[in-house]
Image (cartoon, grey):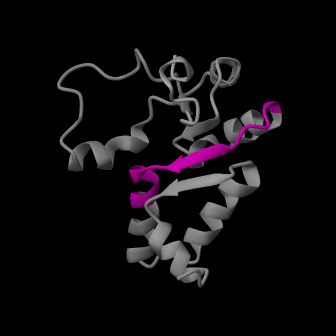
């Protein structure tokens, strides 16, 4: 449809692999976007259903997606690896607010060293992610001397 409307150079990032995760909690609280009733399980993926995640990702590849995303990232590195093993499309991982909050809380309390930030992001790359979407972007860039 995009191509027929003159948008043939518009890239499509598929959100096919978005789990109905509790890791979105801090963002939903800050944005006051928590569901008033029920949950989002009717249109987000079952956290236990690996096969559906892979099937949905491959369906989006077949429908013309230009890149894929797995969200959240950290608890789903197995899915990241399996999507990577089944497609050559660019793959992004979204390191969501709950993952960020857990790590920052542990750093602030002295339970973990701040180097765990880079270790965490490297784990996503190692699992197969080409792009990282993360609240740690500025901190990681400084830690890696990219800024």
Q: Residue at x 26, y 19 (%)?
A: 38
Outermost residue on the right side: it is 85
Q: Give the range drawn in magenta.
A: 86-101
Q: How many numbered markers are drawn?
A: 0
Find residue 18 and report its horizontal and vertical position in percent.
51, 31
**Residue 113 is at least partly visible in this image:** no
Image position of 82 with respect to 1: above or below: below
Find residue 127 and report its horizontal and vertical position in percent.
74, 49
Is residue 71 in the magenta section?
A: no
Image position of 2 with respect to 78: above or below: above
> Where is residue 58, by image quadrant?
top right
Q: Which residue is drawn at 61% across and 70% down?
A: 118
Q: Residue at x 52, y 22 (%)?
A: 46
Image position of 82 with respect to 53: above or below: below
Find residue 122 and report its horizontal and vertical position in percent.
68, 63
Find residue 70 and report its horizontal and vertical position in percent.
58, 38
């Amino acid at each position: 449809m995009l191509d027929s409307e003159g948008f043939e150079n518009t890239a499509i990032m598929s959100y096919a692999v978005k789990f109905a995760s509790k890791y979105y909690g801090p963002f939903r609280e800050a944005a006051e976007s928590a569901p008033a009733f029920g949950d989002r399980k009717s249109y987000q993926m079952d956290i236990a259903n690996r096969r559906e995640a892979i099937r949905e990702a491959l369906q989006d590849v077949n429908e013309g997606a230009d890149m894929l995303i797995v969200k959240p990232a950290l608890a789903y590195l197995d899915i990241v690896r399996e999507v990577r093993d089944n497609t050559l499309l660019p793959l992004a991982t979204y390191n969501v607010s709950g993952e960020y909050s857990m790590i920052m809380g542990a750093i602030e309390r002295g339970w973990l060293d701040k180097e765990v930030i880079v270790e965490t992001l490297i784990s996503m790359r190692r699992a197969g992610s080409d792009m990282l979407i993360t609240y740690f972007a500025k901190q990681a860039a400084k830690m890696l001397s990219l800024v």
